[in-house]
Amino acid sequence: MDLEKWTNTAVEFATEYGLKVIGAIVFWIVGSWIIKKIMNATKKLMTKSNYDESLQKFLINLLSWGLKILLVITLLGVLGVPTTSFAAVLAAAGLAVGMALQGSLGNFAGGVLLMIFKPIKIGDLIEAQGEIGVVKEIEIFTTKLTGLSNKEIIIPNGALSNGNIVNYSTEGTRRVDLVFGVGYESDIKQTKEVLMNVLTSHPKVLKDPAPAVTVLELADSSINFAVRPWSKTEDYWAVYFDVTEQTKEALDAAGIEIPYPHQVEIHKGE
């Protein structure tokens, strides 16, 4: 008798909910397929409309999240869960989660601000939150950079939008700040000529703005020169390292000494 009762209950449950579950599974598969098609169509439309790459990825991520949430809510309706009641529960849960995840909401708001004011875009070399790297992707909550040593750096959008951002790519050129010291017995005019020749002979040093060589300071043991070549942003490190190496070679060839600490060995007599 118990077996028969259990069987009848199982049949009733399967009859009542089985079709709903099957329908929900089919709905999920079809809905996911439709979302995928919508996302692909949106990407193509944005590409044809020449949307900024940063804005493209941000809007696509936002649209993807929105469609998936809508699919889940609709799926619950197919299963027979009252969507009005669920909406009320969702609103209450959203308030609680929002209070618990204030940082995440701040990051979302930061991402929106980055998209509106566009202080950075994909491909820019920036310095922010103590990190330097090329912007790889601006997502809903975080921004990804590729560091100079090819490491991935992830910065929360809230911190990024509220902090200082140094964008080295906006102007397209950078000034390379170098300092070289020579001995006090060196001729200042000759030294400036040698340093300027190094700059003007380098193919990646720009002629406009013109490079500059000036006396920076009279230090304790050296005359320090400020050497200021300009380069394209992508040539910055090539100019930095090349000029440093070539300056040493040029000063040596001209007989101009670069001061360095000397160790004097003193022999005491018996």
Image (spheres, rainbow, N blue to C red):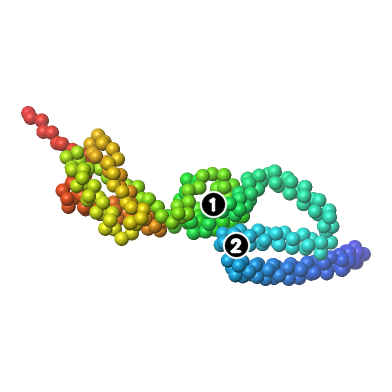
Residue 119 image label: 1
Position of the C terminus, as image quadrant, is top left
Between label 2 and label 1, give the one nearer the viewer: 1
Indicate the secondary structure of the residue bearing disc 2: helix
Q: Residue at x 67, y 71 (%)?
A: 37
In the picture, the disc for residue 56 is 2
- Residue 111 visible here: no
Within 10 Å of disc 2 (Cα), the crowding (few <14, some 14-19, many 20+) is some
212 lies left or right of 27: left
- Which amino acid, by three-letter code, is at mark 2? Gln
Q: Quadrant of residue 139?
A: bottom right
Chain-order first, disc 2 or disc 1: 2
Point out residue 159 in the picture as x, y percentages from the top left corner.
56, 46
Residue 232: x percent and y percent? 39, 57
Estimate the spatial distance between the alpha carbons at disc 2 and disc 1, rounded to whole Å: 16 Å
Picture quarter with the N terminus: bottom right
Q: Where residue 177 appears, x then y in whole percent?
A: 35, 47
Write the residue at 71% across / 62% down: 67
For the point 76% across and 70% down, which residue is it?
Answer: 26
Badge 1: how crowded within 10 Å, few (<14), some, or many (20+)? Answer: some
